[in-house]
Each structure stands twice: as structure tokens, then as C-alpha cells.
Image: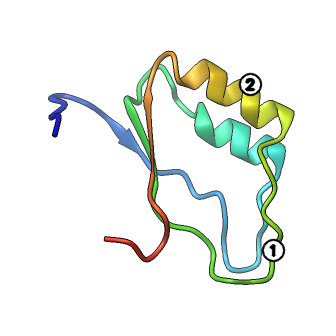
Amino acid sequence: MKIIISSYVSGIRLFDDDIKSTDVTEAKALIHEIQSVDIYSNSWGPGDMAWQVEGPGQLTTDALEIGIKEVWYYWQRPGCA
């Protein structure tokens, strides 16, 4: 386990009970305040609303490519400890 001292964590909401994210909202969230944030956490998600999960769009892919050079991304499947 690594410990990061003096780091900043950001949790940005992508989904809500009745709001589906878009390529634009996902891309913006993944690089939100990138100059100030060290770790982005996405350890929650929407309930099962029969949404079809697709791969990232081009804007989200571009944002991830920018972000992985500067920050840590952390994902955890909903309901896992």
C-alpha cells in the first residue's frame, strides 16, 4: 500500500438517479481542476436503470490520456468494500 502525503482527492458526480452522463460531462469530470487534484475517485455509480454501458467517447478518451500523465484515477465497482 502506498501513502500519498499532501494530496488532493476529487469526487465528481457523473450519474444521478435520472441523469445519464455524456461524453462531454465525463471528459470534463476526468480533468476537472487537474492542476489542483492528485487523485480522482469514482467508487459509486447509478442503480440498475437498464442503461446500456458503452466504452468512452472520443472526448473522454482524450481526457483520460491527458489525466494519466498527471493524476491517479481510482475506480471501484459499486457495492464493493
Query: Mark 1 vs mark 2: which is more N-terminal?
Result: 1
> Which label was assigned to residue 42?
none
When the figure is inspected, residue 41 is found, relative to residue 78, above or below; the finding is: above
Q: Position of residue 28 (x, y in %)?
A: 69, 37
User: Mark 2 = which residue?
Assistant: 62
Residue found 53% across the figure and 23% down from its top = 68
| Rendered image quadrant of residue 50 | bottom right
| Rendered image quadrant of residue 79 | bottom left
| Rendered image quadrant of residue 47 | bottom right
Q: Are marks 1 and 2 in contact (CB under 8 Å)?
A: no
Q: How many marks?
A: 2
Q: Position of residue 11 (x, y in %)?
A: 46, 51
Classify the position of the N terminus by image quarter: top left
When the figure is inspected, residue 45 is found, relative to residue 3, above or below; the finding is: below
Give left or right: position of 3 versus 52: left
> Which label was assigned to residue 51?
1
Helix, strand or loop under label 2: helix
When the figure is inspected, residue 9 is found, relative to residue 35, above or below; the finding is: below
Type of the residue with mark 2? Asp
Residue sticking out furthest to the top: 69
Give left or right: position of 23 versus 42: right
Q: Position of residue 59 (x, y in %)?
A: 81, 32
Residue found 59% across the figure and 31% down from its top = 31
Helix, strand or loop under label 1: loop
Give left or right: position of 43 versus 58: left
Residue found 75% across the figure and 46% down from its top = 25
Q: Position of residue 51 (x, y in %)?
A: 81, 74
Q: Residues within 10 Å of mark 2 (few under 14, many from 20)?
A: some
Q: CA distance from mark 1 to mark 2?
A: 23 Å
Type of the residue with mark 1? Trp
When the figure is inspected, residue 27 is found, relative to residue 51, above or below; the finding is: above
Nearest the viewer among 55 and 8 is: 55
